[in-house]
Amino acid sequence: MGQILSDLGGELFVLFVSIAQALPALVGYIAIILLAMTVWRFIRRQMTPKADYTSLKTVTFGDESAVVSDKAASFISIALIFVIWGAFTGSNWLPGMFHAPGPFVGDSSFVYTVEDANGYQDEATVFVSVFEKGAEVPSQEVAAGTGFAKDDFLAVQAYRSKLILWDKNDETNRSEGAKIVSVDGRAISKDNAVDVGFGRVALTDKGTLNFEPGKGWQMENIWLPAPDSVASRLVSVWAEGYQNVTLAEHLSFSLFRVIVGFFLGALVGIPLGYAMGLSDWFRGWFDPIVEFMRPVPPLALIPLVIIWAGIGEQGKIILLFLAALWIMAIGARSGVSGVKISKVHAAYSLGASKVQILRHVIIPNSLPEIFTAARVAMGVCWGTVVAAELVAAEKGVGKMIVAASKFQDTDIVLMGIILIGIIGFGIDVLMRLAEKWLVPWKGKG
Amino acid sequence: MSGLEIDNISMRFELPNGGAVQALKDVSLDLKKGELLSVLGPSGCGKTTLLNIVAGFLAPTGGEIRLNGGTVSGPSADRGMVFQQGALFEWMSVRDNVGFGPSMKGMPAAEKREKVDHLLDVVGLQDFKEKAVYELSGGMQQRVSLARCLCNEPDVILMDEPLGALDALTREKMQGLVLKLWKETGKTIILITHSVEEALLLGERLLVMAPRPGRIHREYRLPFAELGVGADLREVKKHPDYAKTREEILTMIWDMEEEIMGRSEESA
Ligand SMILES: Nc1ncnc2c1ncn2[C@@H]1O[C@H](COP(=O)(O)OP(=O)(O)O)[C@@H](O)[C@H]1O
Ligand SMILES: [Mg+2]
């Protein structure tokens, strides 16, 4: 127990350190938000002022109705994400002057000093050529130069590092006791690397040199691809597919699972909720089951569902069915329980039968709650399907992004995540539209 | 016999903590067809309970209700109910709300339409027929409630503080409407109210109830409802007996309230 606590304490400490390191970025971001606000407010004041009800209010701080989402802020916020993203990935979408300093690419050189076993020293130059990933590897003949240390040539890919076997061509070598004492005139040792301006030279345990070209501030493509490469990946994957499966196929499989799973969940969940709302026996029967199943996240059921139904469509549809089932049942139940008793009494006094009351009072009265539940269920189903596909699937957006991550195709991973977000948002927007259209009386009781 | 008989009704609620509330004790009353009865009394004296028993939503623990000779055992279309608020179906238009009863009986569409149109004219909502009910003001919603109840042609109309949530001006207009409808349709009406003035104006007979146990304390027969039909209600209030009766009833209710306060202070 004490061990666990101290482990957790250690984790917490590491976490705090990371947060503390991220703090300046956070402060900078907030500063940008406030700066943009000040600038935008100033610009707007120069334009014709609005005179609608809200803008004439003098008390807005604390008046919830006066706080409406500022479209300009949303626009700037999204634009800023792309600018930051582009700047730190050297995107073509962004003029070069906005780019953060990129990795060093090109030719340069540094000088090392060798001391042989007898204490004699000599210098030699290492000509370095840093090339971009995918470019042709440069090669160059270098003249040996004078003295017992001979000049070397090194070709290294940006973001990578390379060992320099400096004594390969020298007249003395490490086995004879020669060693490097300084680089560019600055002393070097195992724990004291030298910054040569365009990169870093370190001394390894074996006495060789390790050169690492400067990385600049930009992210390497496999960490974070530029927005334009994500976009072009979208175009190419849409046209040609990825690993022999088209994007449309991946998306349709995911959506198919969500829609079928949700539909089945609603088909069973809504009548179940009605039964629970209308009969004390059914409520007593299902309450413990529903109350127990509701807090179990559908993701936790994935292993069991795989054991029972394998990784085929059935398993995933069962999972989504279960994800939707409890939410829909609870929504329908509270929709039924939420009917005002005076409405039911009124209907009875107007001569309605039980079936008529169900049809004309209870069902329409529960529809707003059912729609709310359906929105939640759709969101949960969409999240669950992606997660289930991450674990086991042959097709689907989730599958696409795990497959891409195995091949370090980060641009596809990012594209997939963005698509997942957009589709999830799209589903919610559609549900809200449907709600507005089908239950206009929502909240008007 | 034609009319409503409330025969020796008692109602005792068992409470979860083992105690019991005697909400009504031996309440008896006969209403002839077409009579207008208003019921008044301090809060908690069992008015709503009595109305719910007459409507058939509650089974009394003693006594019985008979309508036109038959014993009442549950809600039915022969006793219509007008609630204070929120009993309209907001998923239906004004027209469909009013036509709800006939629809349930399967009345032919044309006949129903004519009937609904007529009633909406009577309550003054001819321009709002296709509107959604939540688009209407509180007073208009209560007009819809009245029309919905009348459209079903019940023998008895039960109203539990139907005008309680309305502002004073709207309320006065609605009181006139209730009187007009009572006279035109000849329905038996029981109207519960908190307002002494309303009880005086809208009751040929006025029942003052007393609490603990809920019982009939006093009954009045009043001329004001008859006088008020089609007349200016403010004129009716100038009637010499009006102010006198009002003061008498107010004193009665104040005394009851004070007794309640005193008793709950004792028990506290
Ligand atoms: N369902 C119930 N369970 C227990 N007591 C109730 C219930 N309904 C009403 N009562 C009690 O019966 C009494 C009469 O209530 P009610 O008829 O609502 O009074 P009123 O309408 O005159 O204000 C009150 O004391 C109330 O607490
Ligand atoms: Mg009441």
Image (cartoon, coloured by chain):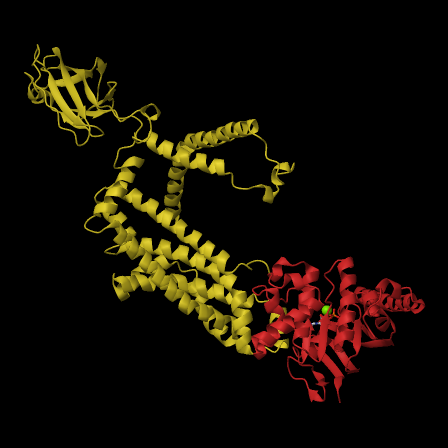
Chain colours: A yellow, B red
Give the position of the N terminus of chain B as an image quadrant: bottom right
Decide which of B81, A143 is in the foreground and name it: B81
Q: Residue at x 26, y 49 (%)?
A: A247
Q: Residue at x 27, y 52 (%)?
A: A248
A278 vs A314: above or below: below
Q: In this view, does B73 lie to the left or right of A105?
A: right
Give the position of the C terminus of chain B as an image quadrant: bottom right
Q: Quadrant of ligand 1?
A: bottom right
A297 vs A10: above or below: below
Q: Is residue A440 left or right of residue A222?
A: right
On the image, which quarter does residue A156 sit in? top left
Q: Which residue is drawn at 15% across and 26% down?
A: A163
Question: Percent x, y for residue A170?
Answer: 7, 17
Q: Residue at x 35, y 60 (%)?
A: A259
On the image, which quarter does residue A265 sit in? bottom left
Question: Percent x, y for residue B75?
Answer: 64, 79
Q: In this view, does A79 lie to the left or right of A234?
A: right
Residue A373 in sight from this viewpoint: yes
Please, which residue is most extreme toward the right here? B240
Question: Percent x, y for residue B169?
Answer: 78, 58
